[in-house]
Amino acid sequence: METNKKKAPVAKYLVYLGLIVVSLGSLFPFYWMFVMATNPNSMINQTPPVMIPGSNMVSNFQLVLDSIPFWGAMLNSLIVSSTITIGVLILCSLAGFAFAKLEFPGRTMLFVFILGTMMIPPQLGLIPTYFIITQLGWLSDLRAVIVPGLMNAFGIFWMRQYISSAVPDSIIEAARIDGCSNFRIYWNIIIPTILPAFATLGIIVFMAIWGDYLWPLVVLQDQSMHTIQVALRSLMDDRVRDYGMILSGTFWATVPLIVIFLLFNKLFIKSITDGAVK
């Protein structure tokens, strides 16, 4: 018994040590990007590599501001990512509630059809979607990015699965006996229950839209409408590449993602642990 008690703390410390090593390994690319963003371009390929931050943080970022409309692109990305995230959360939670708790003809077939769209590469829809956007006159308009982004099959699947397991049918039936409409059930019962799922899906969608490059590049032809990923691409000169400047812009463009994750990480972890317990 004493031997087992001694082994338990050792195993626990080994697990903690492993988690620390993995965490540091995950954070190292971000730290390396910060180091490169604070050093001049001449030190990027230095051997041995530079491992401590330099003193060029302000000058490198000033070069970014002189080269591209950085703050305008950040604002465009914030508008697009926030709008799409909020829209996806609302639409997918409503659809997930319908597929999980409501009975209507063709429910299973429609759900299978939605899941089937997840197997289609998004690049295949590039040309027809571009044609529709052109007919609507939305080129170089943020609506060209926002409206197509509201359709999210994974979000519907995620919400349907979470609502099915997190909300008992007995609560829904009791609410209907009390005279609650479907929307009242959704607003007063479903939403408070699925806040962890909201946080998880919100983080996933926000990060995906923030990092999207191909579709905004195609439809946002006006430089004033560029999102941050398209604007950062403009920093890549074919002749001379200032990697300190490029990584400085990339570093500051990554900060909003970190802030979003830190704000909602508790709910994100709760959604994972809830699933593990159930």
Image (spheres, rainbow, N blue to C red):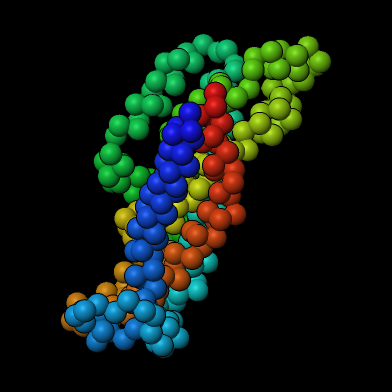
Name the residue at 32% across, 76% down.
Answer: 51
The residue positioned 39% from the left and 68% from the top of the image is 31
Q: On screen, 145 above or below 52?
A: above
Residue 95 seen anywhere in this rendered image of the structure: no
* Rendering quarter of residue 170: top right
Residue 254 percent location from the top left of the image: 44, 64
Q: Position of residue 229 (x, y in %)?
A: 38, 64
* Residue at the (31%, 69%) spot, across then down: 233
Describe residue 176's horizontal placement relative to residue 222 as left or right: right
Closer to us: 52 or 235: 52
As drawn, is 217 to the left or to the right of 175? left
Residue 134 point in image, percent of width and height: 37, 52
Extreme right residue here?
178
Front one among 16 and 232: 16
Q: Is residue 98 visible?
A: yes
250 on left or right of 104: left
Picture quadrant where residue 189 is located:
top right
| 167 left or right, relative to 49 | right
Asked where in the image residue 210 lies, by quadrant, the reply is bottom left
Q: Quadrant of the C terminus?
A: top right
Q: Is residue 220 above or below residue 153?
A: below
Q: Position of residue 122 (x, y in %)?
A: 31, 42
Residue nearest the observer in this picture, 65 or 37: 37
Viewer-side residue, 145 vs 62: 62
